[in-house]
Image (cartoon, rainbow, N blue to C red):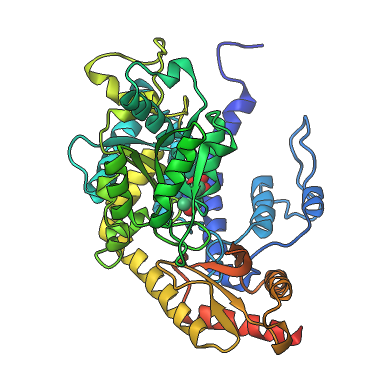
Amino acid sequence: MDLNQPPAELRAAYAELEPLGHRVVEVLAAHLANVETLRVSNTTRPADLEAQFVPIGRAPLAASAANDPEQPVLLAELERIIAAAQHVHHPRFIGHQVAAPLPIAALTALTNAVLNNSSAVFEMGPVGVVLERHVVRFMTDAIGWGAAAGGVLTHGGSIGNLTALLAMRQAQSQRQTAGMDPWRDGGDRFAVLASADSHYCIARAAQIMGWGSEGVARVQTDASGALDVADLERALLAARAQGRRVLGVAASACTTALGAFDDLEALADFCAKHALWLHVDAAHGGPFLLSDQTRDRLRGIERADSVVWDLHKMMLMPSLITGVLYKDGRHAAAALAQDASYLFKAGAEAEYDLGHSTLECTKPTIGVTAYLTLALHGTDFFGRYVERCVALAQQFAERVRAHRSFELAADPQGNIVCFRHVGSAQDAGNADALDALQEDLRARLVAEGHAYIVLATVRGARYLRTTIINPFTTTTDLAGLLMLLDDLARGA
Ligand SMILES: *Cc1c(COP(=O)(O)O)cnc(C)c1O
């Protein structure tokens, strides 16, 4: 074995970047050019899809007999993978909150994968760290916070909410009881107030922290689906009566299922009155800050202590990039008050070691992706995109309201619209039949491959749910969706 030079097979593997890279981009571009002609989603049964791919072998995967012998195996496999994927760029992919990523964002993600710097420690990824700080500054400025604000990027709203609630636990328990340090001493009698419609990751975070299923003290929702401010006082007292130390409120901006925005001004007043921490889960709605037409949905957000904001939902970036943001940036490191002397510096430049403030140790340079995508397009571009999504959703809601066969679950406040088919005359008032009808309509719509929407439960009833997040969706697509659903219901 010659240890004085890399082996031929490794050199050959690394030499593939240029020839394969060009062709992969061609395959992806052709896919996007064609996407509208495809079935929106893949409804192959899981086990059948699994069987379409051979187990990983000790020897390289060989080209199948069906392949063009000139075509590299990678391209043949990518073609199969693309064909089996969900097509998020399809104009009628309007179900979940998934972005159709901008090419700049996708190409910078590729660059990150090639350079493979890590942005938890400055020395391991200096440019990733400083660009991440620029992104965090853009977000904290958009919230309306001052120079003391700070934060980090992390991998998704779920991890982001856990991180922010760790900061809340640390800061707030010390504020309430001098000398208490849950990071050091543990403790499980804490609770956070949140509405019944808050994202499940809030409850999961409380349970990860050991607070159990009562760790989220539930507040009722009002008719709009937002946290019912009138129920806060009761929920606080009830949790305290159970022996809970209530640390704060986790607001939703907006809720995932229905898209309802909690009243942040009222929640900030409540938190000020009771000396509680206000956390705002703006995973979906954070980008509404970027347009004067939609900013008012988040009125009061500048009074929050912490905010979570996803860039991979309403900001056209690939998964996962999330801001965990603090009005007082010092809370970022206090969230995870731990020492790792082999990694982190102390002193003036310590704040450049972002791993003080993130669950990740090795962390891809997601700041590079976010920085270049934001800077090259300019942030107004994203404000206009949000405006368009909301305008389309409002127009769609009008159409639902005007249609005899459909009804809205609630007036949409943003770009999420929940509605249902009212069924035939004999379904009227039969809740089970109506639920079954929505399930059936959705299953058949998706099986036909013309459109992709999802289901949500609102006030105990099943609704069809659309998220208007796709830049390619038009009025015609949404009008067509109603027609398709109505035709399916009539054919039933
Ligand atoms: C999507 C969402 C989350 C979860 O974020 P991920 O990035 O999917 O982990 C949390 N809260 C709200 C309100 C969301 O819409």
Q: From this viewpoint, which residue is outermost toward the front?
A: 241
Nearest to the observer: residue 121 or residue 5? 121
Relative image position of residue 254 (x, y in whole percent): 42, 57
Q: Is residue 419 above or below residue 74?
A: below
Nearest to the observer: residue 439 or residue 377? 439
Relative image position of residue 440 (x, y in whole percent): 73, 72
Q: Is residue 134 left or right of residue 78?
A: left
Q: Is residue 14 left or right of residue 251?
A: right
Q: Quadrant of residue 184?
A: top left
Q: Quadrant of the C terminus?
A: bottom right
Q: How many marks?
A: 0
Q: Residue at x 43, y 59 (%)?
A: 226
Q: Is residue 409 left or right of residue 139?
A: right
Is residue 315 among the parts visible in the rendering? no
Relative image position of residue 325 (x, y in whole percent): 33, 39
Q: Residue at x 77, y 32 (%)?
A: 59
Q: From this viewpoint, which residue is outermost toward the left?
A: 147
Is residue 200 among the parts visible in the rendering? yes
Q: Quadrant of residue 213?
A: top right
Relative image position of residue 345 (x, y in whole percent): 32, 14
Q: Residue at x 38, y 33 (%)?
A: 168
Q: Quadrant of the N terminus?
A: top right
Q: Is residue 319 above or below residue 31?
A: above
